[in-house]
Image: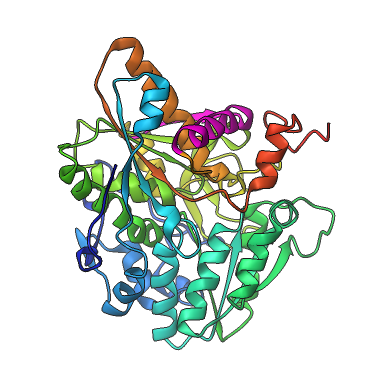
């Protein structure tokens, strides 16, 4: 069963969680002076509108009409009840998922790529640079850049550049230039921190370029709240007042924030962020100020971090291989409002295959982390006999990740590292 909203029912404002935080966000710090960053420090990288969204305390932020026109190409996305999975598990839990895989890029990432491209075009920027892990963000920004007539250069984590060649093809089809990162260490597997350094360095040394980030920052999470806002209304159509539990995979925090932040004001709703044990920032990191990139070029952010020089194993969930997390997510974890758990990739793919054999769709490795937690929570409900309502974000499809499934199905997948080569 699925619940759809009409294209004229797309939300016209983004939900801002900042007024609902019990503890105020600590400010980002300048990498040189270690003083709070001001708008003038961010102006070389971001347009004025996004800088304003980064610090606004307004409860809602209007979505420009030009952005809505593009979002309506695929939004609102469906809410689907996973009845076959429920039956397979024998659980009394009712499982719903928000299907973000229906976007042109196949994931939730265009929700922020489109407004970022729009605001940069409006300010006269000609070219955008960015990083990408698994390629979901890079393909989304390439798509958005094509629609607004911008050049786009993507620095792709080298491990994913080799694992996911068709993500590169998607980006190039939309006109982007894609290079493996780090650019100066051809034998290095790369990391999101290193790719961010490459992209920021490029933008900072070009007067006609800006940098675009697919996760972590406040304005990115703001744009993604269309997911959770739509889900609230669709659950009402399904006869559910509120979910008992909201689940999402979490790397930098954009997907999880999109589904979960609109439910922060509802105290009875549990919020669960799921990450890989290979890069377990929320469950194993320290809360501290740290750079957003490896080279130390970005502002220092208050977050749970494994250290900006941390290089994670080359697991297939490239979008979750980031050393830190969004300050908003970390603030809520620190306050106890968000829970976090971590899984090895072998258990994650086990869950993804079970989901595919029940529901039919093949999830991205990142999305599979959420599926793993959902299955475990549904089995826990089976043990206790609770009729809990579980909502999760199906953040992207895995049709360009079949190499990862091939490794899993044929015993070549290490629990928490690269394929074993068996």
Q: Residue at x 44, y 84 (%)?
A: 121
Q: Residue at x 22, y 67 (%)?
A: 12
Residue 222, image x, y percentages: 33, 58
Residue 397 falls inside the magenta stretch? no
Q: Nearer the viewer, residue 319 or 395?
A: 395
Residue 52 horizontal side relative to residue 305, left or right: left
Residue 249, image x, y percentages: 46, 41
Residue 198, image x, y percentages: 67, 66
Say how many tags the image has. 0
In which quadrant will I find the N terminus? top left
Residue 260, image x, y percentages: 32, 44
Q: Which of 409 and 388 is in front in this view?
A: 409
Q: Which of 235 and 217 is in front in this view?
A: 235
Q: Which residue is drawn at 50% across and 63% down?
A: 105
Residue 418 drawn above or below residue 163: above
Residue 406 horizontal side relative to residue 252, left or right: right
Magenta residues? 338-359
């Amino acid at each position: 069963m699925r619940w759809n909203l009409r294209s004229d029912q797309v939300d016209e404002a983004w939900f801002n969680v900042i007024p609902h935080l019990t503890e105020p966000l600590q400010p980002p710090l300048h990498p040189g002076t270690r003083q709070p960053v001001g708008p003038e420090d961010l102006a070389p990288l971001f347009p004025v509108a996004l800088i304003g969204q980064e610090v606004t305390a307004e409860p809602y932020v209007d979505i420009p009409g030009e952005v809505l026109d593009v979002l309506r190409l695929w939004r609102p996305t469906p809410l689907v009840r996973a009845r076959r999975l429920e039956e397979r598990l024998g659980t009394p839990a009712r499982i719903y998922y928000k299907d973000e895989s229906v976007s042109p890029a196949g994931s939730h990432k265009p929700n922020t790529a489109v407004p970022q491209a729009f605001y940069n075009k409006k300010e006269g920027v000609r070219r955008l640079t960015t990083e990408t892990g698994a390629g979901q963000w890079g393909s989304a920004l390439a798509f958005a850049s094509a629609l607004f007539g911008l050049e786009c250069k993507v620095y792709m984590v080298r491990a994913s550049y080799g694992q996911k060649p068709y993500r590169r093809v998607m980006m190039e089809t939309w006109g982007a230039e894609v290079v493996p990162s780090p650019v100066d260490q051809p034998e290095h597997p790369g990391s999101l921190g290193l790719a961010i350094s490459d992209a920021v360095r490029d933008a900072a040394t070009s007067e006609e370029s800006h940098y675009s980030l697919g996760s972590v920052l406040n304005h990115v999470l703001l744009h993604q709240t269309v997911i959770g806002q739509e889900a609230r209304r669709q659950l009402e159509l399904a006869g559910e007042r509120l979910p008992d539990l909201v689940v999402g995979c979490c790397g930098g925090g954009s997907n999880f924030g999109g589904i979960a932040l609109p439910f922060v004001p509802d105290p009875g709703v549990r919020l669960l962020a799921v990450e890989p044990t290979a890069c377990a920032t929320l469950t194993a990191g320290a809360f501290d100020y740290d750079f957003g990139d490896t080279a130390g070029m970005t502002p220092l952010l208050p977050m749970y971090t494994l250290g900006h020089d941390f290089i994670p194993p080359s697991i297939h969930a490239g979008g979750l291989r980031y050393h830190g997390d969004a300050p908003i997510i970390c603030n809520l974890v620190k306050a106890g409002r968000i829970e976090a758990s971590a899984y090895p990739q072998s258990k994650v793919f086990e869950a993804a295959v079970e989901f595919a054999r029940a529901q039919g769709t093949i999830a991205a490795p990142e999305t599979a982390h959420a599926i793993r937690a959902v299955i475990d929570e549904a089995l826990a409900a089976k043990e206790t006999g609770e009729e809990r309502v579980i909502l999760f974000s199906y953040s992207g499809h895995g049709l360009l990740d079949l190499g990862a499934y091939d490794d899993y199905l044929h015993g070549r997948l290490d629990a928490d590292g690269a394929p074993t080569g068996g």
